[in-house]
Image (tube, rainbow, N blue to C red):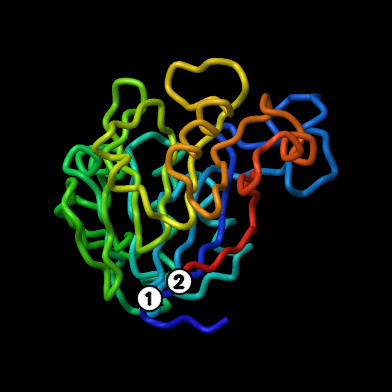
Amino acid sequence: MGLNESSLKITFLGTGTSQGIPVITCNCEVCQSDDHRNNRLRVSVLIETGDKTIVIDSGPDFRYQMLRAKVKDLDAILFTHEHKDHVAGLDDIRPFNYLLHKNIDIYATDRVQDALKREFSYIFSDVKYPGLPQIELHSIDQEPFFIGKAEITPLAIMHYKLPILGFRIGNFTYITDAKAISEETIAKVRGTKILVVNALQRQTHISHFTLEEAVEFGKKICAEQTYFTHISHNLGLHEEVEKELPEGMKLAYDGLTLFSE
């Protein structure tokens, strides 16, 4: 399918929680599964518009995700928040700098930018060591902005007590690490055709939607397609969990590709 100015190609680079699946040392049936859909890297998504290539969050698996998805170009990274499983791979943009001869645009709130400056202080040092990542910082808040011809609408989300961002691009909405979503934000999401939202596990969690909470949120939005991401091994086997989901709702998995008009 070719992309026009209003279409998106969406590839799930990672659909796992902060530890990924399999979890180190774990012998549960999910971590030991041979089904590739149960093998989840840290959460991230690739969005190809008609004229730009965008990644939301560059976690610790960013390098491998770029290789696995055969990404040859990158224009921008959007950051939802500053937790390590969402930012740790920023250094691995260097090959794009070198091979494409361009800086990578980084879109983040001022608070997240402050965290990046702490975590990657060498990038922002006055002494520029050869081969450092080359970036251009762009401050965002809750106002819509453009990357190329694509309009991006930030969405205010609460990750326990931490304000973070989801993003809506056209008819595609991406939300991860949510625990509370205001009616104001819900109003911005309604009408979306493809909704992605986190569903960590079945048990109550202090900072993430459970599967039940994610399903209830999905019912409020009534998107044509709803996909769940940021999944832990505690949720269960992909094939078994999907059998329980309402019509129009599915678990995302690494490598899944969608198209949105």
Q: Which mark is residue 6?
A: 1
Q: Residue at x 55, y 53 (%)?
A: 225
Q: Nearer the viewer, residue 250 or 50?
A: 250
| Figure quadrant of residue 244 | top right
Q: How many marks?
A: 2
**Disc 2 marks which residue?**
261
Q: Decide if residue 73 is on the left or right side of residue 257.
A: left
Q: Residue at x 82, y 34 (%)?
A: 32
Decide: is 101 above or below 205: below
Q: Decide if residue 255 is on the left or right side of residue 98.
A: right
Question: x, y (%) of residue 39?
Answer: 71, 43
| Figure quadrant of residue 5 | bottom left
Real-space CA distance between mark 1 and mark 2, rounded to the nearest whole angstrom: 6 Å
Q: Residue at x 24, y 37 (%)?
A: 184
Q: Decide if residue 35 is on the left or right side of residue 97.
A: right
Label 2 sits on what residue type?
Glu
Pointer 1 with pointer 2, Cβ within 8 A: yes
Label 1 sits on what residue type?
Ser
Nearer the N terminus, badge 1 or badge 2?
1
Quarter of the figure with the N terminus: bottom right
* Mark 2 Cα shell of 10 Å, populated few (<14), some (14-19), many (≥20): some
Q: Residue at x 46, y 57 (%)?
A: 193
Question: x, y (%) of residue 16?
Answer: 59, 39
| Figure quadrant of residue 255 | bottom right
Decide: is 225 above or below 40: below
* Mark 1 Cα shell of 10 Å, populated few (<14), some (14-19), many (≥20): some
Question: x, y (%) of residue 13?
Answer: 56, 55
